[in-house]
Amino acid sequence: MSGRAGQVAIVGVGLIGRAWAAVFARAGWSVRLTDPHAPTLDAAPALIAGELQALARHGLVKDPDAAAARVAVAPSLAAALDGVDFVQENGPETVDAKQQIFAELDRLAPPQALLVSSTSAIVASRFTEQLTGRARCLIGHPVNPPHLVPLVELCGAPWTASEAIERARQIYHAVGQVPVTVKREIDGFVLNRLQGALLAEAFRLVGEGYVSAEDLDHTVKDGLGLRWSFLGPFETIELNAPGGIPDYCARYTGFYKQLAATAAGPEVYESPNVDGVIAAWPHAPSPERIAALTQRRNERLAALAAHKATQRD
């Protein structure tokens, strides 16, 4: 299955769902869109076509018009699921909503189809336990926006079949994503736990007045982030001591133990600290600013993706 283009249903076509549609369409898959909110569904094909054109400007899609032609709006959820190989669900982030949606997906989708949720916070065991086809259900948590940031975290429930996870991994790889497997359920999966650790320290450092909010961002985007765009933390520390990781651990973990002993706690997200963080950010969150920054982010991510595609190991 993973060696050929198949058929995918995108259930929920907001920001993440539309990005997933672009991912699969550019890889040659037939894409069916469904969403209970009619205006969102009606607007989706044109927005997806626009994203594909933007990707093409950076050489990330060879034929954006052909890719867009592979995207179709389904008249119903049942029609969207008819005969598909893969389902990418992007519904509301509540357990009740996931339970309702996955009950319908399990009832209507072909028995061989994988049922995958984009949720970033809810582990699969909380909404798949009672399903007949629970062995084919798992998490495929992307990074926003998934058509520009390829990582996707795969995490099954205790009853998810290993074959389902492996097949999902193969499919995501085939459509140009970078799948990683979270071996057992944990809140936040891996990416958000790493992101959360950095964010908590950022809130503490800014809220307690150690650094300005803008200089904190420079520390990441003009410091750590540059090497993190092509090196992971273990690769990074391997290069930071002559004897690699064992040498690094011998030299520096005493210092990091001290930092870990006083790590930022949940109070950094409460008043008065969070009020200080908000006050420290000098920009009002206007719709115009958010739209402009989103466009700038996407263009820069596309340029970075195009560069990284020429630098494969």
Image: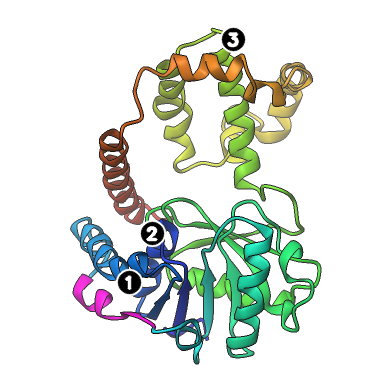
The reply to whether discs 1 and 2 touch (Cβ–Cβ < 8 Å) is yes
User: Looking at the picture, which amino acid does disc 2 mark?
Assistant: His
Residue 67 sits inside the magenta stretch: yes
- Numbered mark located on residue 210 in the image: none
State which region is magenta.
Answer: 63-74
Instruction: Please give the residue where the numbered disc 1 appears in the rendered image.
Output: 26
Q: Position of residue 107 (x, y in %)?
A: 64, 86
**Residue behind mark 2:** 147
Marked residue nearer the N-terminal end (1 or 2) = 1
Give the vertical position of 110 relative to 11 (above or below).
below
Mark 1, residues whose alpha carbon is within 10 Å: few (<14), some, or many (≥20)? many
- Badge 3: few (under 14), some or many (20 or more) residues near its Cα, within 10 Å? some
Work out how far the residue at label 2 is from the one at label 3, CA to CA, in angstroms. Answer: 37 Å
Figure check: 290 above or below 32: above
Residue sitting at x 55%, y 74%: 170
Left or right of 271, for residue 31 = left
| 313 up-or-down from 259: above or below | below
Residue at the (28%, 41%) spot, across then down: 291
| Residue 250 location, quadrant | top right
